[in-house]
Image: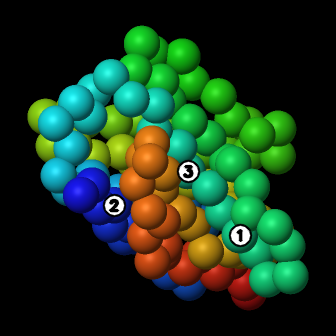
């Protein structure tokens, strides 16, 4: 079955940057599917942060527009989330979503001084 593996999280100061990666394993038609990044902060529900469709359109939640960039490499079955100008409110566990696949373990992002 399809499996997603997230990586790249860590502890950064406000204003810093991180690049998250998600490798999709076991996918035959990776390039045609919409890939999404979600995050879940302590005490809050999981929310969609960004997605990129198989045909090209990209969407972001308002709170990260201008700061986060989603992209993918179809030759590597990998989706990325470049996060710049990080704020404390970005602190959360970040998850990658592939259609019908189970959630992975996520990767922790902590933004603190």
Name the residue that disc number 1 marks: 40
Of residue 19 and residue 39, the one placed in the foreground of this image is 39
Residue drawn at the location 37% of the way across and 70% of the way down: 7
Q: Could you tell me how far apart the alpha carbons at marks 1 and 2 are, in whole angstroms?
A: 17 Å
- Residue 4 image label: 2
Determine the residue located farthest toward the top in the rendered image. Answer: 55
Of residue 13 and residue 94, the one placed in the foreground of this image is 94
84 to 57, vertically: above or below: below
Which badge, 1 or 2, is on the more N-terminal residue?
A: 2
Q: In what quadrant of the picture does the N terminus appear?
A: bottom left
Q: Which mark lies nearer to you, 1 or 2?
A: 2
39 to 13, vertically: above or below: above
Residue drawn at the location 22% of the way across and 30% of the way down: 29
Q: In what quadrant of the picture does the C terminus appear?
A: bottom right
Q: Could you tell me how far apart the alpha carbons at marks 2 and 3 are, in whole angstroms?
A: 11 Å
92 to 58, vertically: above or below: below
Q: Which colour assignment does the render follow?
A: rainbow
- Residue 82 image label: none
The spot of residue 40 in percent (x, y) is: 71, 69
Location of residue 25 (image quadrant):
bottom left
Location of residue 87 (image quadrant):
bottom right
Q: Is residue 18 visible?
A: no
């Amino acid at each position: 079955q399809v499996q997603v593996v997230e990586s790249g999280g860590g502890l950064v100061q406000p204003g810093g940057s991180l690049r998250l990666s998600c490798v999709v394993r076991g996918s035959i038609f990776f390039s045609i599917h919409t890939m999404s990044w979600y995050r879940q902060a302590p005490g809050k529900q999981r929310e969609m942060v960004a997605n990129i469709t198989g045909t090209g359109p990209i969407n972001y939640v308002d709170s990260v527009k201008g700061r986060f960039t989603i992209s993918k490499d179809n030759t590597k079955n990998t989706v990325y989330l470049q996060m710049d100008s990080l704020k404390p409110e970005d602190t959360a566990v970040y998850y990658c979503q592939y259609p019908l696949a189970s959630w992975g373990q996520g990767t922790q992002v902590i933004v603190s001084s």
